[in-house]
């Protein structure tokens, strides 16, 4: 195929604001159709970005003019519609998390592999070039041997009625926000990272977690402390501490496309701030998805990475639920 023909399964805010602009701007991608259960919403999205409006998700998957789908549905709906898309023979770019439970993530990854299809989890921040720059600095020994990580992602309280407050569709801070610093911990601690302790702050009225934290460790002794929440001042950063220094990423998870990121490098007697070129992480994840399918380019957002992420989220949730929650409101 010369261009990737893609359908959008669900007219979510993230699709309108970020992903559809990136999809339509990519020269290797054609947006063929956009589906919603609401025909007026599908028509509005199609008018804004091109493609044919489709009423109903099943109708989109039944089309014969698609190679792939992008799925921005609420978290609890991801697994079932990812499965249906794979069964229909379509490659899938799914919003994170691919599944809310590790067993479902394992099944979907195995299904994609068995059918020779790409299932890519949309951790778009990992496609931003600032993180590759950090990895290069670590590999060069800039801060020596990595000993620990702290990672934070928090946002102010969403407006009432936001889907993050709806437990039935996978709401809560852990699945929507916590997965970012948790993925960062896996990147630097490796897949053997285990949960030493965890807590979730459950709002008793909303029945969702509105914040939390976890302490992670791997067999060689490296540790990570991750915090997340949605009743906080905005915070989006991580710091790696080694035996010779520290690297801080000051705007880690949601930098705008025009932002020139700053990486702070600290040693005992010096501090350096490096300004990197701007990058568009949404454009980058679309390019990687297309390259994976069209040219077979490897990606670290598929396969084992999805399973490791889902497993660690499961274990954090299980650990947090073992103890009474001091933060219940």
Image (tube, grey):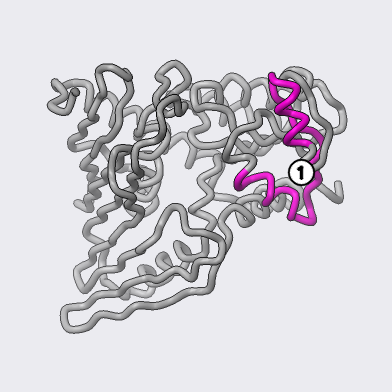
**Image height of 276 relative to 203, above or below:** below
Which residue is the site of mark 1? Answer: 49
Q: Residue at x 25, y 53 (%)?
A: 150
Which of the pair 71/296 is nearer the observer?
Answer: 71
The reply, left or right, for residue 5 in relation to residue 142 is right
Instruction: Name which quarter of the figure residue 160 lies in.
Output: top left
The question of residue 309 being in magenta is answered with no
The reply, left or right, for residue 314 in relation to residue 74 is left
The reply, left or right, for residue 113 in relation to residue 68 is left
Q: Residue at x 37, y 70 (%)?
A: 263
**Image height of 134 relative to 142, above or below:** above
Dot 1 crowding, Cα within 10 Å, few <14, some 14–19, many 20+: some
From the top left corner, tell me how far across and down residue 29 is, in percent: 78, 48
**Image height of 212 relative to 318, above or below:** below
Which of the pair 134/114 is nearer the observer?
Answer: 134
The residue range painted magenta reads 17-46
From the top left corner, tell me how far across and down residue 234 is, in percent: 33, 50
From the top left corner, tell me how far across and down residue 127 is, in percent: 54, 56
Give the residue furthest to the bottom. Answer: 269
């Amino acid at each position: 195929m010369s261009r990737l023909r893609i359908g959008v399964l669900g007219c979510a805010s993230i699709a309108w604001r970020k992903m559809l602009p990136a999809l339509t701007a990519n020269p290797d991608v054609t947006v063929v159709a956009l589906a919603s259960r609401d025909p007026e919403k599908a028509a509005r999205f199609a008018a804004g970005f091109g493609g044919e409006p489709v009423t109903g998700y099943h109708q989109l998957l039944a089309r014969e003019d698609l190679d792939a789908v992008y799925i921005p549905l609420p978290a609890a709906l991801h697994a079932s519609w990812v499965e249906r898309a794979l069964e229909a023979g379509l490659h899938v770019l799914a919003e994170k998390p691919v599944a809310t439970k590790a067993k479902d993530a394992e099944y979907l990854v195995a299904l994609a592999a068995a059918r020779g299809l790409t299932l890519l989890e949309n951790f778009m921040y990992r496609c931003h070039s600032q993180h590759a720059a950090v990895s290069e600095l670590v590999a060069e020994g800039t801060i020596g041997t990595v000993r620990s990580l702290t990672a934070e992602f928090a946002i102010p309280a969403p407006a009432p009625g936001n889907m993050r407050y709806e437990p039935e569709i996978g709401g809560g801070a852990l699945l929507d926000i916590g997965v970012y610093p948790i993925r960062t911990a896996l990147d630097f601690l490796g897949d053997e990272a285990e949960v030493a302790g965890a807590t979730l702050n459950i709002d008793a009225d909303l029945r969702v977690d509105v914040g939390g934290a976890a302490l992670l460790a791997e067999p060689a002794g490296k540790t990570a402390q991750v915090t997340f929440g949605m009743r906080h001042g905005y915070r989006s950063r991580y710091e790696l501490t080694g035996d010779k220094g520290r690297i801080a990423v000051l705007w880690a998870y949601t930098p705008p496309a025009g932002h020139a990121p700053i990486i702070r490098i600290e040693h005992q007697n010096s501090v350096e701030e490096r300004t990197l070129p701007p990058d568009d992480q949404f454009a980058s994840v679309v390019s990687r998805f297309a390259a994976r399918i069209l040219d077979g380019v490897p990606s670290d957002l598929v396969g084992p990475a999805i399973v490791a992420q889902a497993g660690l989220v499961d274990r954090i949730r299980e650990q947090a639920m073992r103890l009474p929650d001091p933060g219940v409101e």
